Every structure is written in structure tokens, then in C-alpha cells.
Image (tube, coloured by chain):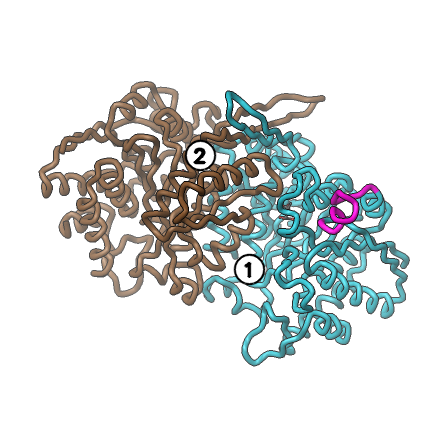
Chain colours: A cyan, B brown
Amino acid sequence: MKKNIAVIPGDGIGPEIVKEAVKVLKAIEKKYQHAFTYTEVCAGGCAIDKYGKSLPEESLQACLDSDSVLLGAVGGPKWDNVDPSIRPEKALLGIRKEMGLYANLRPAKIFPQLAAASPLRTDIVENGIDFMVVRELTGGVYFGEKKTYEVNGELYATDNMCYYEHEIKRIAHTAFQTARKRNHKVISVDKANVLDTSRLWRKVMHEVAKEYPDVELQDMLVDNTAMQIVKNPAQFDVIVTENMFGDILSDEASMITGSIGLIPSASLGESKRGMYEPIHGSAPDIAGQNIANPIGTILAAGMMLKYAFDMDEENAVIEKAVADVLSDGYRTGDIMEEGKTKLFCDEMGDKIVEYI
Amino acid sequence: MKKNIAVIPGDGIGPEIVKEAVKVLKAIEKKYQHAFTYTEVCAGGCAIDKYGKSLPEESLQACLDSDSVLLGAVGGPKWDNVDPSIRPEKALLGIRKEMGLYANLRPAKIFPQLAAASPLRTDIVENGIDFMVVRELTGGVYFGEKKTYEVNGELYATDNMCYYEHEIKRIAHTAFQTARKRNHKVISVDKANVLDTSRLWRKVMHEVAKEYPDVELQDMLVDNTAMQIVKNPAQFDVIVTENMFGDILSDEASMITGSIGLIPSASLGESKRGMYEPIHGSAPDIAGQNIANPIGTILAAGMMLKYAFDMDEENAVIEKAVADVLSDGYRTGDIMEEGKTKLFCDEMGDKIVEYI
Ligand SMILES: CC(C)[C@H](C(=O)O)[C@@H](O)C(=O)O
Ligand SMILES: CC(C)[C@H](C(=O)O)[C@@H](O)C(=O)O
């Protein structure tokens, strides 16, 4: 199959980890006789340096023209003080919005080989951690109107948290369909005892639920969910929630697995085309040292094959290679334990290619 | 000293646990020759049943007339479908707003006797968990304008997240002053890479920080904070954040201690008068069975003595009694372990009084 992949290395460790993911994709191409082309796209902090904005027109266009986007990471302290309108993160938000990627899927799953790295008690980990956070990605307070102005001699700032019914409806469908492929249980997270957007959210979730009688729906308040993720993560199958809550809870959910360097995420819209990235950031402190963990990006590339190109087998091969490499004791620095073999970033990429 | 305490039993287990806290306060009265009067105030779900609204005028007035307010818990599924304008939670929000209680102090601290109940790994717990979450309580998306209406044939809902400079300034002072009594370190949590309110928040925090050169200030993004609380809670001394983030993070922070039934919270304003309550909810499932844990409410009463009435010694006596009761192996059902003595709610109250 021919596919055109837009590749955004981004900032910090982004270029290093993306390089390894492309290495793995090339190995898959060879093994399965696909023909992928890779269009390198400049976005994020590096685009600010070069073009004065984080998402130049041509970059966005290249993403829109692609069959799917693979991203490393964007941002870093270097751009902390640039004007908010051109921040590195704007690239991410811009791509999400312009490509219509309203659903962010983030798996929280323990790698058995790394279970000891979980910050949770062994008995809690042993009950199982394997759920999917479905985060709404193009609505809510992220995209509502923002203003800062003076009122009676002092500054006043506002961000509008807002949702249309149809925005909630479509993410509800994503959640229920995801649950159908898993354990048929959706927990919808909101703050309906305080927010109007949450009350609308809850109403729509229950309406859509009627189309999925085989899936169980339960509501949970966001504050309680933040507790339950730590206390009893085994209770979750699919969590669906709005943008801001999803940002917070999906990061919390990743952390309890103890291996955020290994977790991929997919941002999807109506079509199969999406954006795939590791969940971790650009880690500028270790950039350029060849010690980053490329596995999150490699698994993101795998997710892309599966979700965007229907290449289930190819993704399974990547997942198995990663699992075997871990089982055989290979580690990057962030997940190093006594008695294991420490690899550099590019060595980890090579090793996974070898297992493929 | 004479003090007039407004007591809101509330719903669910509220009346049971408040009864034990009042028992303890009476023991303190006797021991120190104080004269407290207790004005019972009806608010929450029970007020909806009786008066058709969760915070009747007279109830609010009784709080405003008091020297301080002690609250059990409000809410429950019974009132899940009442009109949003009269929900049980409105009582809480109303009291916070009308009494000007803009600062919520929530300690996250391990009781050494209950360390095993923490969901975190022993080595993480052993590094220490002892920090204070300072949550802004009368601003942000909780109190911004809320609307739900039809646009082009579909529903649209909005909640306005908004902050005035002076609202941020005063909570900043609370945080820095709290840090001065602790380890001189404030972590200010925001989402400044996305929100205007967060950028204003960050700006004001750094301005106010100049008045506290002895306190270290660090910014942390809210998603990262949700991870760090689980990964490395020992790094925190004081966390300060806006209302919604504070709701989520303070609950997460409580949970990692493993003993949410024991944690009190104080809501404070400009004056010493505040509202004191346990952090847990009304637990309707176990209401009326005399098995709730009254310790959170009892410690909240202690906090009230200390913060509202400057009775440091009296609070210390309560804290010591609780610690000794735990050390001597007395437990309520929620924190029961093998080899300990299980007490009913009222027996726990009696036991703590005995130790006082
Ligand atoms: C960088 C930031 C804007 C982004 C977000 O909050 O969505 C990130 O935290 C994420 O979760 O992808
Ligand atoms: C009951 C609810 C409105 C309240 C809040 O969100 O503030 C509660 O969760 C709390 O934290 O005190």
C-alpha cells in the first residue's frame, strides 16, 4: 500500500525519537511491501525560530494533504515567553482543530515487564490496569473565547468553556464504539453538580447510550475520578471526558502505569486520518544526548498503521517486537533497572527493527 | 472564651459525624473552660426537602452571624434530579461566596499509623507525604456566568472561567503565608500554555512572590501536577491553584494518603471566621448505620479552634488524642486492619473524648 505520512519531529527530543519511529516504519514497509513517503513538516518551537509562528500555512497544508501525521513533541522553556498567539503548543491545537481531530485516545496499560515501575502498591497493580481515556479534543475551554482586559484599573481574564450538543454526541459515539471493542463499560466524567457544560455533557451521553444497549454507562464526578484512578484503576474500561478534564486525567492515568515513555496516543476525527504521538513531552533537558526513550513514538507509529491504514497485523508485529525487546531485558535510561541492558535511543530503535 | 458556632449537619452521614465532633468540642469546652454555643443550621438536601432550597435565608444568616461554621457533608443521589438552581451543592457554593471564603486549605498528610493504607508504593510513601493544597474557592469557572440555550436547533452550554487580578493576589498571599509556616516552597499550578486566566494567574503569582523573598516559587502545569502527585509527592510543600484545578488535585492529593476519612479542610476569608469540614462526602450508602468515620470532622473542629479562635493548644490536644487513639489500635470500618479494634462512629467519638 502507498501512504503519505506527514512527519513532525518538533522540538527537544522530538527529532531523535521520530527518527527511530521512521526506522521502524521503514522496516515494516520492507517486510510487507508497502510504500510510505515521509514528508517532513516544520511545526512547534523550531517553526517559531524559522518562520515566526509555530504552525506555518505550508506545514498545516502538508498535514491536511497527508494520509496521516506522526508527531514527536513540541515546546520547551526556550519559547516560554513568546507571545501567546504564536506559542509552540498553538501548533498542536491548530492541527487538532484544522484537521477536525476531536477524539484523543490514550491507553493506560501496564507493561507486565515494567510493572515494578508503577508508583502504585503491588496489590493494586496486580488487579490490573488496562483502560482507555477518550478525551474530547477540539472543544471546551481550550477553544472557547479568551480575553484579558482591564476593568476598574485591574486586569481581568476569561476563558469560555463551551460545548455544542453535536460535539458531545460524536465523542460519545467514539467512546461507546471503543467500549464495544473492549469490556463494554463507559465511565463518563463531568462536574455536573457545578457546570452547565457538564450537565449538557451528561444529558447527551445518556441519550447516545440508548443506541448502545450492550454498553454500560456510569457517570463519575471529575474530582472523584482523580481519586479512583489512584485507588482502584481496575474498575475502568473506557473513560470519556471533556478536553480540560481529559488533559488532567489522562496524564494521571499514564503516570500510574509507571512508564509514560512508552505510551502512544491517537487523535482522530471523522475520517481515518489522524495524528499520532507519544504522550510525553519534548524533554529539552535530555535533548540531543541520544538517551530518550523512542518506544512511545514507535508504538504511536504502530497505532497509526492500525487506525489510519487498517494495518492491524503490522501494528501487532511492532507491539510484539517492543514486548519481546522488553522481555529480553533491553531498556532505555528512563526505565533502567538493575540487571538489565541499557541502550541508547538509536540502539533501542535498531533493536526493535531487529526483532521485526 | 465565648464562641458561637454554626453547625450544619447536612445529609447522609453528616448528622452522625457532626454529633461526634460536637461531643469533642464539648470536652474541650470543659477542659479549658470555654463557652461555645451551637446553632444548628439546616442546609443542603435536607433543606431542599423542608424549604424547597438548599440554603434558606435564615441558614445563611445564621452562618454570617456565627464566629465560625462547622459542616458535616451535603448532597446525595436523592437530589440528583432537582433543578440545578436549588441543588444541595448550591448551599456550599452559596456559603463560600456569601461569607467570602476564598481560600480552601486542604492538608495532604500521611498518618504514620495508617501508612499501609496509601495506594502508593512503600518507598514513595516513606519519602514523606506532607503538603498543603491552597485552592482558590470563590472564583473561576465555578462562579462565572453559566448558560444553556439553543443555537441552530441544538443545545449549547457555556461556563465562563474568569479571574480578577485581586482574586489571584489575595490567594497568592494565603499561599505564601502558609509556606512561611512550613517549608517555604510554593508550587503554583496552572495551564498557562492554553488559558488566559492561567497566564494572568502566573503573572500575579510572580508579582506577589517578590514580597516573599524567603519563599521559593515554582510554576507547574496542571496535567504535569496530576502526574507528580502520584510519582513524587515528597516534592510538594504548598500547592496553590485555581478553583477547578484545586477541586481535582486536592482530591487526588487526599487519596494518596490512603485515609480520606481523616482529612479536614478549612475555608477561609479575610477575617478569621471560616467554614470547617471533612473532605469526604455524605456517603448516603452507609448513612444511619453508625459506621462512618468521624475523625475528619473532629479534626476539622480542631482546625476551627486553631484558625478561627486562635486556640492552638486546644487543637493540639485534639490532634494528639486522635493520633493516640490510632496508635492504640482503634479503627472505624473504613480504615480497619487485622489485629485492630473496630469501633462504631459514636464509640470513636467517645474514645477520642476519653483521650482528651
Ligand atoms: C501541550 C498542550 C497544549 C497539550 C494539551 O493540553 O492538550 C498537552 O498537554 C497534551 O495533552 O497533548
Ligand atoms: C460539592 C462540590 C460543589 C464541591 C466542589 O467542587 O467545590 C466539593 O467537591 C468540594 O471539593 O468541596
Residue underneath mark 1? A129
SS for callout 2: helix
Q: Which residues are magenta?
A: A45-57
Indicate left or right for A253 with A305 as reference. Answer: left
Q: Is residue A52 magenta?
A: yes
Q: Is residue B238 above or below residue A1?
A: above
**Mark 1 residue type:** Ile
Indicate left or right for B179 with B166 as reference. Answer: left
* Secondary structure character of the magenta stretch overall: helix
Indicate left or right for B190 with B274 as reference. Answer: right
Q: Quadrant of the N terminus of chain B?
A: top left
Q: Position of residue B263 (x, y in %)?
A: 33, 47
SS for callout 1: loop
Residue drawn at (30%, 64%) of the image: B338
Q: In the image, are marks 2 and 1 on the same chain?
A: no
| Chain for numbered disc 1 | A
Q: Position of residue A43 (x, y in %)?
A: 76, 49
Residue B254 visible from this viewpoint: no
Q: Position of residue A348 (x, y in %)?
A: 70, 72
Q: Are marks 2 and 1 in contact (CB under 8 Å)?
A: no
Residue underneath mark 2? B169
Q: In front here: B280 or B132? A: B132
Q: In front here: B297 or A141? A: A141
Q: Is residue A143 magenta?
A: no
